[in-house]
Amino acid sequence: LYGRGSTDDKGPALSWLWVIQAHRKLGVDLPVNVKLMFEGMEESGSEGMFEAIQLLSKEGKFLSDVDFFCISDNYWLGASKPCLTYGLRGLAYFSCSVQCCEQDLHSGVLGGTVHEAMTDLVQLMASLIDSSGKILVPGIMDDVAEVTPEEDALYETIDFNCESYKKENKVASVSNKLMYENEKDLLMARWRYPTLSLHGIEGAFSGTGAKTVIPAKAIGKFSLRLVPEQDPKRIEQCVSDHLNKVFASLGSPNKMNVTLLHGAKAWLSDPNHPNFAAAARATEKVYGLLPDYTREGGSIPITTAFEEATQMNVCLLPVGACDDMAHSQNEKYNKKNLINGVKVLGLYLHELGELNGPKPSDCRCVELTPEELMEPGAFMRGFKCKCFM
């Protein structure tokens, strides 16, 4: 099924409605109460959504009695094996502007007489990262956690192949080379380490043909994907300090400004939580195998917003495949994924309905101590008390 938004996220979003429709047509009661939240502004900053979540999480409001959250807004790691996602990277999106005059100038008439903004900006952008992918901004890696043996073990059984990855992402026919040729190293670089990407330059000539213009103002756009423990505000300070230092070393009289356009913290959940266990059982019943447990390099800020506002667990249950080409040409949603996705989501609700014990949202217990949280059966996310299911 081809079309803009078919896999991101019209197909998966509609699948929840088809689950409800199927129960109604079959005369089967839903095993749990279901509340749906659809957002139409995720690609433009989710303005107002985070404030709404805070408001709706207050006592007696729409989200106050929700026990489990499930989001289907990401994709499988591969094209054939399903997965559950327990971590997302955060985001710090920047603009860096350099201005040399009030309006664009003719390079033939005035070239060589003014300090050009583009020349400064290109050097600033080049100071952020090298061709091997190493971030050159001091302090960025300071808060990155070490890989634990438990985390390292999760990568051992993941179904992933570097050669297939190159083909799926259209790299094989061009450079045919990745930053890492080892599967584990590549996945860690994609999921659990920060990255910096240069996106473009606003104000520069980018059309076809040749235009001999000196831009009056050039604005570079770049972003960092953040990992747990990294604070966008601290990252903003590191980036600002670095670019100001580099700009000062250029000795340029131009005006430079750095702005954090958008920041979001990373999200990391516990794949052993009952919410994930229910999703895993549902997946196994449909596909005949347990899903991989993955993290994602992208960001879904609403995930953290739900958990922080309600203290309930969020599970990412993707139904689309890795080669769906979201946001790109010929975006698609496989019919098989659509049909099986509806089955998985429906069974997931029934697995939740089988859980026993107190409602997580009703719990008002005193939180466990750090030592008690280490005991078997204590839940690091969602339940933080002495309640058991």
Image (spheres, rainbow, N blue to C red):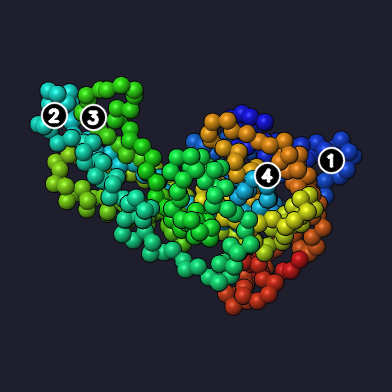
Question: How far is the residue under mark 4 from the one under mark 2?
Answer: 55 Å
Q: Residue at x 57, y 37 (%)?
A: 325
Query: What is the quadrant of residue 324 in the picture?
Result: top right
Q: Which residue is mark 1?
A: 23
Quick one: label 4 or label 2, which is nearer the N terminus? 2
Q: Which residue is mark 3?
A: 215
Q: Position of residue 382 (x, y in %)?
A: 65, 61
Q: Are marks 4 and 2 in contact (CB under 8 Å)?
A: no
Pointer 2: what residue? 111
Q: Which residue is at a point 75% across and 56% down the rendered structure image? A: 289
Residue 109 in picture, x, y percent from top left? 12, 23
Under circle 4, the secondary element is loop
Q: Earlier in the sequence, mark 3 or mark 1?
A: 1
C-alpha span from label 2 to label 1: 71 Å
Q: Count residues near mark 2 (Cα–Cα under 10 Å), then give few for <14, some for 14-19, many for 20+.
A: some
SS of the residue at dot 2? loop
Q: Nearer the viewer, residue 122 or 55?
A: 122
**Quarter residue 200 falls in:** top left
Disc 4: which residue: 319
Instruction: Look at label 2 and name its amino acid.
Output: Gly
Residue at the right extreme, as displayed: 27
Q: Nearer the viewer, mark 3 or mark 1?
A: 3
Q: Amino acid at mark 1?
A: His
Which quadrant does the C terminus fall into? bottom right
Q: Distance between the Cα atoms at labels 4 and 3? A: 45 Å
